[in-house]
Image (cartoon, rainbow, N blue to C red):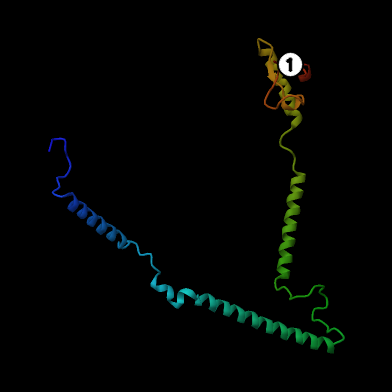
Amino acid sequence: FGPMDRAVPLGSKICARRAQQRRHDMHRERVRDVKPQVDTSMPRVVHLNHVHHNLKKEQMLEDRYSEIDRENRILLKKMSEIMSVGSQATTPRPRADEGRKHGGALSLNRDARKKELLRITKENQSILRRIQQAQPVYNHVEMEGGHWKNTSYLKNCVEYPLVLRTPRSARGPGQSCASSQLVRLGEDPEEAPQGP
């Protein structure tokens, strides 16, 4: 054997082939008979009765059906009483509260609610009267005069012609709301030169 010959030395190739075949068959048998680590078989509790039948739900349904039957019997009894009484009585019975227009029970706190409603109405009327009779605190005529007086002072104080922004309401319909024009103080915004 040379140094580059790395094969396993064999005494007989036939015996080695037979041993290899036996090892391979044993390996295939072990693979075929391997048991899984995870149990995927059907659970044992699947055959128990409480898994298939929800007894609580069935009981609740039975209770609901019995309640519906009881209400139906009560309704049937009332309808039969109405039918039997309605055929006997041709004239309506006088009611205890003849003055009332609507049926139903008398309200126990009707007077208290009326008093409270009247009190709230009187308070609202007095507040409205005070608001209408109140004199304004600000005099808009004096404020306008003060504004024009201050503007004239400003014109006298500045060295160069005063330039202010145009109000948004004075802009034309074609102009966007974000842009503004500069107008000299005292000029009409429509006569102002158009900017680039």
Q: Nearer the viewer, residue 50 or 63?
A: 50
Relative image position of residue 121 (x, y in whole percent): 75, 57
Image point (15%, 47%), residue name: 10
The image quadrant of residue 88 is bottom right
Horizontal side of residue 45 vs 162, given as left or right: left
Amino acid at the residue labelled 1: Gln
**Are there few (<14), some (14-19), or many (20+) residues within 10 Å of tag 1?**
few
Q: Nearer the viewer, residue 162 or 72?
A: 72
Q: Secondary structure at mark 1?
A: loop
Tell me the quadrant of the picture where the N terminus can be found.
top left
Horizontal side of residue 29 vs 43, given as left or right: left
Position above or below: 143 against 81: above
Relative image position of residue 149 (x, y in whole percent): 72, 20
Tell which residue pokes out farthest to the right in this image: 91
Relative image position of residue 155 (x, y in whole percent): 70, 14
Q: Which residue is mark 1?
A: 194
Q: Nearer the viewer, residue 171 or 111?
A: 171
Image point (75%, 57%), residue name: 122
Image point (50%, 75%), residue name: 54
The image quadrant of residue 42 is bottom left
